[in-house]
Amino acid sequence: MSIFTKITILFLISLTLMVGIGYKIDTINTEKYESIVLQKYLLDGRKIFRWMATSSPNELEDKFRTLNLVKIDSVVTKQVIMRQSHTFGLFEILKAEGGEYILHIRYFEDNIYLRDTTLQEGLREGWILNALVIADIVVLSVIFILILRMLSPLHSITASMRRFAKGEYRSRSAIETHDEIGEVARSYNEMAQTIENLIQSRQELLRDVGHELRTPIARGLFALEQLEDSKVRETLKHSFKELDQLTQELLEIEKLQATDIIRSDRFSAETLVMEALSKLYLIDESNLSVTIKDNFILTGDLQYLSLALKNLLDNALKYSDRFPIALDVTTNRISVYNHAQPLEREFNYFLTPFTRQESSRTTQGFGLGLNIVSKIVAKHGFSLTYKYENEEHCFSILTA
């Protein structure tokens, strides 16, 4: 769960609690205020009925003032809080549309509407509490927005890191704030620059060393051709060829790491198989059985993918203890089968450079073949799978 999601959830919980508290406070205040109004208007109503029976209109007005009551015109009633009949009429406590509480007295045919001026203070206090709750909700919302705005640069930093992890080594964060997040962005930019420099230095070193090695290797092979045939000559020739192969594979790995697949062609699986077989050094063609059940179309770099398939075939031929090995092509799957002893370690171990089956009958190779295959397959967005059943290895390239 992201930080933004957590903050949003906490804000919604806090907002819900605040609204609930505000509603409860408003309910309690309303009930308390109505209780006070009922008690006061009940006492006032009884007095007014006695006064109306014994006092003149002018005297009655003066007595209203002693109770802090003022006459008002008839009102639009929103709710009848209480109604009580009397011998000569009735009196009611009404709640008007404006939220005021009105005392209505009917004495014979006369209707009088009175409002207590002292009760307005209690009503104002209730509104003050409600206003404070609303202000608290507003402040909480503002804090939430400010926190999101302060954390929003993290999206940009994260996106830059993802691009860097995918090989865009020039990816940098543009955040320049002067807070802790800005410090994180600057630290990331410095780290990215350092890593980019190291990667470039390593790439340049490997390219230079690889190209420089090929010249003395070619010179040594040429010089060996001038020598008479002997066991030492063959040993040296074999060593030079292994060194040339190692240099070529290292340069290939470096090229895969430094660049993306540059071609995106459409071709059939049969074309891929033929291209891979053309690169394969096969002494006896009977050692390989090819079955194409579905000549499907795939998109990618033909040269790289044929190199990957050639490496799988080469490993199968190299480590198999029974021939022929099998190459099967089905829908979106190209599989290579060979009969051999199980792997000594987990499959992922052999995807790292310079790892190979030590107990195998052959010591050829440098343990780079599967590493190259995995990099080519990953750059195409394909999958490389492996299983071992019935004493048979199966390496498959899944294109979908």
Image (spheres, rainbow, N blue to C red):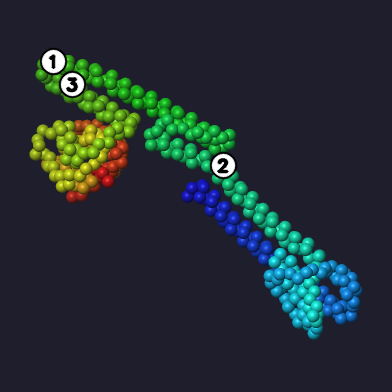
Q: Reading the chain from its start, which is encountered first: label 3 or label 2? A: 2
Quadrant in the picture for residue 376: top left
Residue drawn where x is 42% and y is 30% of the image? 170
38 on left or right of 263: right
Q: Residues within 10 Å of mark 2 (few under 14, many from 20)?
A: some
Check disc 1 and report the residue beneath it: 227
Q: Residues under labels 3 and 2: Cα distance?
A: 67 Å
Q: Amino acid at mark 2?
A: Met
Looking at the picture, which amino acid does disc 3 mark?
Leu
Q: Residue at x 54, y 35 (%)?
A: 182
Looking at the image, which is closer to me, 399 or 205? Answer: 399
In the rendered image, which residue does mark 2 sit on? 150
Which residue is identified by label 3? 236
Mark 2 secondary-structure assignment: helix
Q: Residue at x 48, y 30 (%)?
A: 190
Categorize mark 1 by other alpha carbons within 10 Å: few (<14), some (14-19), many (20+). few
Dot 3 falls on a residue whose secondary structure is helix
**Residue 218 in picture, x, y percent from top left:** 21, 19
The mark nearer the N terminus, 1 or 2, is 2
Q: Position of residue 159 (x, y in %)?
A: 45, 39
Residue nearest the observer in this picture, 36 or 321:
36
Number of other residues with Cα within 10 Å of mark 3, as a class: few under 14, some 14 to 19, many 20 or more: some
Residue in front for this viewpoint, 385 or 54: 54
Earlier-in-chain disc, 1 versus 3: 1
Image position of 295 with respect to 103: above or below: above
